[in-house]
Amino acid sequence: MTTTEDTPDPTDEAAALSAAACLFHGFSDPSRLAILRHLALGEHRVVDLTAHLGLAQSTVSKHLACLRDCGLVTSRPVGRASMFGLAHSEAVLDLLAAAERVLALTGDAVTLCPSHGIAAIHADNHEEA
């Protein structure tokens, strides 16, 4: 099958949509969002994030690993610790601001979504327990 400039390659489109879905999965956890928002203030160590966010060290480390794997967070060694910061901070902050605008426009209607809203999240958490 050949494609023209007017007809996008469905394989490329599927790959792009898959990549976008993976990116949004990186943003899909409230703890990861809290970490990203806090890293917008500057670099922090895991111990700093646990103190500021009230999360367990293992939780922060797990989410930082996910965010680093997604390319959203960087780390650099400082002595025996690592300093974590936002990668592509301007783009990440723009995306978070855009999400806030969409939520404001929809009146947070997404929280009522039967598939991915608050009730679905709570149901998933009870199934895992």
Image: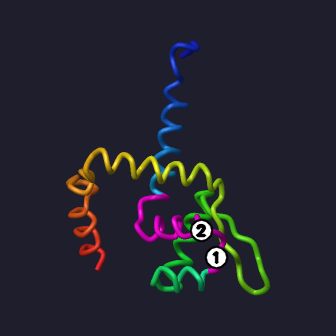
Q: Residue furthest right?
A: 79
**Number of residues whose C-alpha sits closer than 10 Å to that of mark 1, classed few (under 14), some (14–19) or many (20 or more):** some
The residue located at (57%, 64%) in the rendering is: 67
- Circles 2 and 1: CB distance less than 8 Å? yes
> Where does label 2 land, which residue?
41
- Helix, strand or loop under label 1: loop
Q: Amino acid at mark 2?
A: Leu
The residue located at (51%, 51%) in the rendering is: 23
The residue located at (28%, 56%) in the rendering is: 116
Quadrant of image for the C terminus: bottom left
* Residue 121 in magenta stretch: no
Quadrant of image for the N terminus: top right
Is 73 drawn above or below residue 43 in the view shown? above
Which dot marks residue 25? Answer: none
Q: Exactly how many numbered labels are in the figure?
A: 2
For the residues carrying marks 2 and 1, which lies nearer the camera in this image? Answer: 2
- Where does the image place residue 4, in percent across and percent down from the top left? 57, 12
**Number of residues whose C-alpha sits closer than 10 Å to that of mark 2, classed few (under 14), some (14–19) or many (20 or more):** few
Q: Which residue range is magenta in the image?
A: 26-45
Q: Quadrant of residue 74?
A: bottom right
Q: What separation in Å lies between label 2 and label 1 (alpha carbons)?
A: 9 Å
> Where does label 1 land, which residue?
44
The residue located at (63%, 62%) in the rendering is: 86
